[in-house]
Image (cartoon, grey):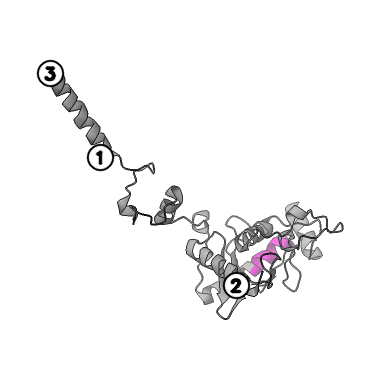
Amino acid sequence: MSSFGTNRTLAAELKEIKRNGVEGFTVDADEDNILSWQVGIFGIPGTVYEGGYFKASLTFPQDYPFNPPKMKFDTFMYHPNVYTNGELCISILHPAIHDETSGESLNERWNPTQNVRTVLLSVISLLNEPNISSPANVDAAVAFRKWREGRDNEFEVTVKRQVAASKIVAEKEGIKVPLTQEDYCIKEKKEELFEEIYQIDDGPGYDNEEDFEIDDYGCDDDDDENDDNEEAEEQSEDDDE
């Protein structure tokens, strides 16, 4: 894909995410370089990362989406799958090449059907369920295993310390970090849900929502049709008399 095609693909992805939103993260891009994105990942409520605001950067190759972006945390991350320099190690960001030493199958690796949304949702999942079989940070992996087994709390203490530091950054940037599942999850706007249900894109006869009434079950308003049927039945009874 040409650089023009890549830029157009990324611009479309950025617009879609900003328009619809998604649970768990925020994104933005450099005005002069669509290949460089800034990411903010929120810790999942109810986990040790709750309240965290973890900043990272995504750098895209010129042939995206045929090859994956690279992701690096700017916020210090004590995590089994994050190198001490912030670089993330996750299967979905590995090129789809056969590597027997990795222990990964090809279907776990990058393919052109993936996008920024699927990558970041995978990263959020990884935060709470790290892969400790081939860690990027061995010390963090050992600490996580001990913490999970209830033998030591070093991992939790360290993570909560980095969460506290990230909250200061969020406050300075005016970022509201979701602390409940209700706030964490994105709810579709009424008009977007309307378009999704009926697959209507301002076509003829349905210029806006008011032109197509919806009852509580998402069905079209058939009161007029019922009125016509009632009138026909009344007329039939009169004729019989």
* Three-letter amino acid code of the residue under disc 3: Glu
* Residue at left offset 68%, top offset 68%: 69
Q: Is residue 160 magenta?
A: yes
* Residue at left offset 62%, top offset 67%: 163
Is residue 127 placed above or below 59 in the rendered structure? above
Q: Residue furthest right?
A: 101
- Residue bearing the label numbered 1: 224
What span is in magenta?
152-162
Q: Nearer the viewer, residue 157 or 98?
A: 98
- Residue bearing the label numbered 3: 241
Q: Nearer the viewer, residue 152 or 145?
A: 145
Q: Main secondary structure of the magenta part?
A: helix
Residue 164 locus on image (x, y percent): 61, 69
Quadrant of residue 65 within the rendered picture:
bottom right
* Three-letter amino acid code of the residue under disc 2: Asn
Q: State how far apart marks 2 and 3 are (Cα).
A: 75 Å
- Residue bearing the label numbered 2: 7
Q: Secondary structure at mark 2?
A: helix
Q: Residues within 10 Å of mark 2 (few under 14, many from 20)?
A: some
Is residue 223 placed above or below 78 in the rendered structure? above
Q: Residues within 10 Å of mark 3 (few under 14, many from 20)?
A: few
Quadrant of residue 53 within the rendered picture:
bottom right
* Three-letter amino acid code of the residue under disc 1: Asp
* Residue at left offset 69%, top offset 58%: 126
